[in-house]
Amino acid sequence: MKPETLGFFDRVYEVAKLIPYGRVTSYGAIAKYLGAAKSARIVGYAMNGSFGKDVPAHRVVNRKGLLTGKHHFEGTNLMQQLLESEGIEVVDNQIQNLESIYWDPSKELSSHI
């Protein structure tokens, strides 16, 4: 399917699927990459609707590394557990050493999805 035929949520999912294991990105970084810099909240809505679509939504956090979407995961600490299973340290719902594991799609990917 050509990128221009994908809906915004589908384009968000395509970017999220490219986040490497053990890395995280932010809602805003995905929005900026897709040419919708002021749409971080819409990216969050997309992540909320991503379950069952094989999208690693746990790898998308807010710009400060906070697990703001954790209440959308089943169980008490599933988002944190998924991140920790990839070697990511989380303390008080915040990613530790964010700058060292942060993945910016605008820098890592060559063309827009």
Image (spheres, rainbow, N blue to C red):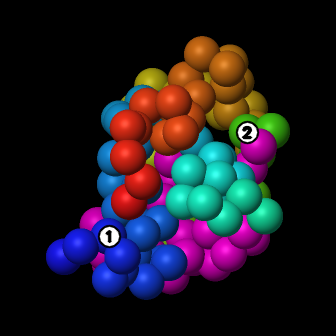
Image quadrant assignment for residue 70: bottom right
The magenta stretch spans residue 25? no
Element assignment for label 2 = loop
Image quadrant assignment for residue 56: bottom left
**Mark 1 sits on what residue?**
3
Amino acid at circle 2 = Gly
Q: Which residues are magenta?
A: 39-63
Element assignment for label 1 = helix
Q: Where 110 sits versus 34, above or below?
A: above
Query: Measuring 60% from the left and 16% from the top, which residue is drawn there?
Result: 100
Labels 2, 1: front one: 1
Would residue 49 appear left or right of 109 to someone viewing this image?
right
2 or 1: tag closer to the N-terminus: 1
Residue 23 image offset from top left, x and y in percent: 47, 32
Residue 20 image offset from top left, x and y in percent: 36, 36
Amino acid at circle 1 = Pro
Q: 88 or 54: nearer the eye?
A: 54
